[in-house]
Amino acid sequence: MDNLNLIKEKFKEDNYARNFGIELDDLTKNSVKMHMTLTPKMNNFNGRPHGAAIYGLADAAFSVIGNNRNNICVALDCNINYHKSPEPGSVLYVEGHLIKQTRKIGTYLFSLYTNEEGKNLKIATMISTLYCTGKPHDPNFEMG
């Protein structure tokens, strides 16, 4: 097993992601793709998908890509900008990629969107920074 498969296995244990129906679609060392369906239980009192649900998908992607080097990493900062309210019941996608990684600090950019009539509609953008502790998720694997 390599570091990417290690974090994929750990993600299967993520109760938060499971409760929201978040699915991991693709993971490389420098990118991640995930999605979830915006269910009625995610709506706010206006009947629209709650901003916390949108943020939750971006944060789940952040946790997976940020921890895919067998190095326990924690969030330092997440800044999300909402551009459009998604339609209730739509599928929300997130794509994230590494901007810069040093030994201890990593910065990532995430784009969240829905697909309506064959067009991607940007819902939100998040930039996030993490701190790497230097402690492995599994000491039997190399940190990379």
Image: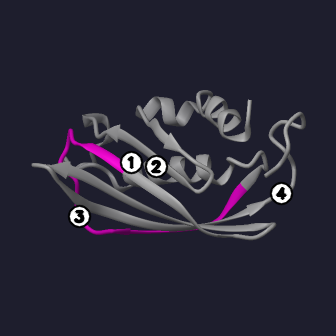
Relative image position of residue 141 (x, y in whole percent): 85, 38
In the picture of the structure, the residue carrying the numbered disc 1 is 53
Q: CA distance from mark 2 to mark 1?
A: 5 Å
Q: Of circles 4 and 1, which is in front?
A: 4
Q: Of circles 1 and 3, which is in front?
A: 3
Q: Are marks 3 and 4 in contact (CB under 8 Å)?
A: no
Name which residue lies at 87% across and 49% down: 135
Residue toward you, 105 or 17: 105
Name the mark on residue 84: 3
Q: Are marks 2 and 1 in contact (CB under 8 Å)?
A: yes
Question: Magenta stretch: dominant SS?
Answer: strand
Asked if the magenta segment contains residue 78, the reply would be yes
Say what secondary structure mark 3 lies in.
loop
Q: What range of the chain is rendered magenta?
A: 74-93
Relative image position of residue 114 (x, y in whole percent): 25, 51
Which of the two labelled residues, at mark 1 and mark 3, occupies the earlier sequence position? Answer: 1
Inspect the image, locate mark 1, and give the three-letter code of the amino acid beneath it: Ala
Residue toward you, 5 or 55: 5
Which of the two labelled residues, at mark 4 and mark 1, occupies the earlier sequence position? Answer: 1
In the picture of the structure, the residue carrying the numbered disc 4 is 133
Inspect the image, locate mark 4, and give the three-letter code of the amino acid beneath it: Thr
Q: CA distance from mark 2 to mark 4?
A: 23 Å
Q: CA distance from mark 4 to mark 1?
A: 28 Å
Name which residue lies at 34% across and 63% down: 124
